[in-house]
Amino acid sequence: MKQTCLLLLALFAFACGQSSSPAAPARPNILLILADDLGYGDVQCNNPQRGKIPTPNIDRLASQGMRFTDAHTSSGVCSPTRYTLLTGRYHWRTRLQAGIVGYLERPLIAPDRLTLAGLLKQHGY
């Protein structure tokens, strides 16, 4: 009995003596979906009655997260959209005035230009 009391007292003293540093706040998960050639009403979360494509997983994500529903584009191809998404800059501020970038061309994004990926990396992602 005496040993049990001493053991419990030692454990209690040990537990009280431990200083725990506050945990760093958890960073939120970021999921960005960019669908090429997909109309606003094609997925069922935006058009439940007439959505052409069954999208149960996208619908579930949309119901639990944030949807960006008001966007405009100045081009009908994906290269300018991707450039703008990565840099936050209008595509006409580069040599990409229209059309599609070829894979053998020099990169549109200057090496010193901050991108979305670089910004996230700076914040520990």
Image (tube, rainbow, N blue to C red):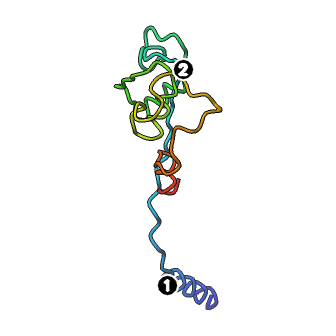
Taking the spot 55% from the left edge, 16% from the top edge, the residue there is: 54
Corner quadrant of residue 75: top left
From what the image shows, is residue 65 above or below residue 49?
below
Residue 17 image position (x, y, % from top left): 49, 84
Taking the spot 47% from the left edge, 45% from the top edge, the residue there is: 116
Residue closest to the eye, 75 or 45:
75
Nearer the observer, disc 1 or disc 2? Answer: 2
Taking the spot 43% from the left edge, 32% from the top edge, the residue there is: 91
Type of residue at label 2? Thr
- The image's mark for residue 17 is 1
Determine whether label 1 and label 2 are within 8 Å by CB: no
Counting other residues with Cα less than 10 Å from the Cα at mark 1, is it few (<14), some (14-19), or many (20 or more)? Answer: few
From what the image shows, is residue 36 above or below residue 84?
above
- In the rendered picture of this protein, how many numbered marks are placed on residues? 2
From what the image shows, is residue 99 above or below residue 105?
above
Residue closest to the eye, 4 or 56:
56
